[in-house]
Amino acid sequence: MANTTVRGALSIHGTNPQFLIEKVIRSRIYESPFWKEHCFALTAESLIDKAIELNSIGGVYGNQKPTQFMCLLLKLLQIQPEKEILVEYLQAEEFKYLRALAAMYIRMTFRAVEVFQLLEPLLTDFRKLRERSMAGYTLTYMDEFVYALLTEERVCDTILPRITKREVLEETEGLQPRVSLLLDAMEGSGSEDEEGRSRPRRVAPPRRGASEGQSRSRTGSAAPPSTSSRASPDPPPQQPRSASPSSPDHPRSRSQSNSIPPNADSIEPSRPGADSDLGI
């Protein structure tokens, strides 16, 4: 009597709800000490206390021993609580293992449309979960566990019932398309880029005198400014004047003036024989 389904329970997917778990695992659950000691005469209300005490999820571990998570899942399939109670389990944010247990049960028993509507909001829950398997304890996350329920065929060593693809449900059942949380951020960044492109940035031209003074002070030497930065072209350097033979400063004119003075008769000879040298 303790292992039979509650009277008046509805068949799920055309079969007894307990048969959704494989017979080998189900028989091991019936023989486990946790099932015999803690799962006897549990109700939808008293099961919450046992679910809060869970510290891991998983199917079987060690020598094919069922986990406490699987024992409570089989008990939910046996008592078949109402839909409103399961939704309350799912919305209990402070008890993550109770939420994981309710998500597993909803995936196995609810319609495909309701599964997507109830489980997809949990993809934003990034809390850590411990998973116990044949290899021991591993670390996973709530969003990864829910994503596995929606996409994979086997979770926690249990074969999940087939589910209709989301694309088909959107066309036939009117399921709303899934909206990514990154869509708003992408749209916001796209609008900012468009505004930045439509409004060109105005940059004030640098002052030439200030820029030249700063560059000279940094280098430590007065570098000649480039032709492009000059306000007006500098005048060409003046060429030195060529000395003409007629200018009085030219050495030749001086020598000529000294050699042939205008009043040669009034000049006394500085040395003997000067008259012969002058040709007088």
Image (cartoon, helix red, strand yellow):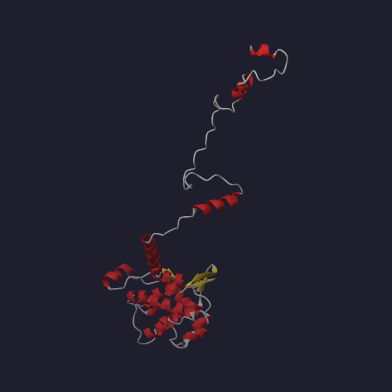
The residue shown at (38%, 60%) is: 197
For the residue pair 69 and 246, the one nearer the viewer reads as 246
Q: Residue furthest front?
A: 266
Relative vertical location of residue 220 with respect to residue 257 in this rendering, above or below: below
Horizontal and vertical percent for residue 266? 66, 20
Is residue 265 at all visible to an observer of this figure? yes
Relative vertical location of residue 151 with respect to residue 54 in this rendering, above or below: above
Quadrant the C terminus occupies: top right
Q: Residue furthest left?
A: 172
Horizontal and vertical percent for residue 169? 30, 71
The residue shown at (41%, 68%) is: 185
Horizontal and vertical percent for residue 149? 41, 71
Name the side, left or right, on which 210 lies relative to 278: left
Horizontal and vertical percent for residue 94? 49, 81
Q: Residue furthest right?
A: 272
Quadrant the N terminus occupies: bottom left
For the residue pair 208 and 232, the one nearer the viewer reads as 232
Relative vertical location of residue 244 with respect to residue 216 in this rendering, above or below: above
For the residue pair 62 and 165, the one nearer the viewer reads as 165
Name the side, left or right, on which 273 lies relative to 9: right
Relative vertical location of residue 164 with respect to residue 222 in this rendering, above or below: below
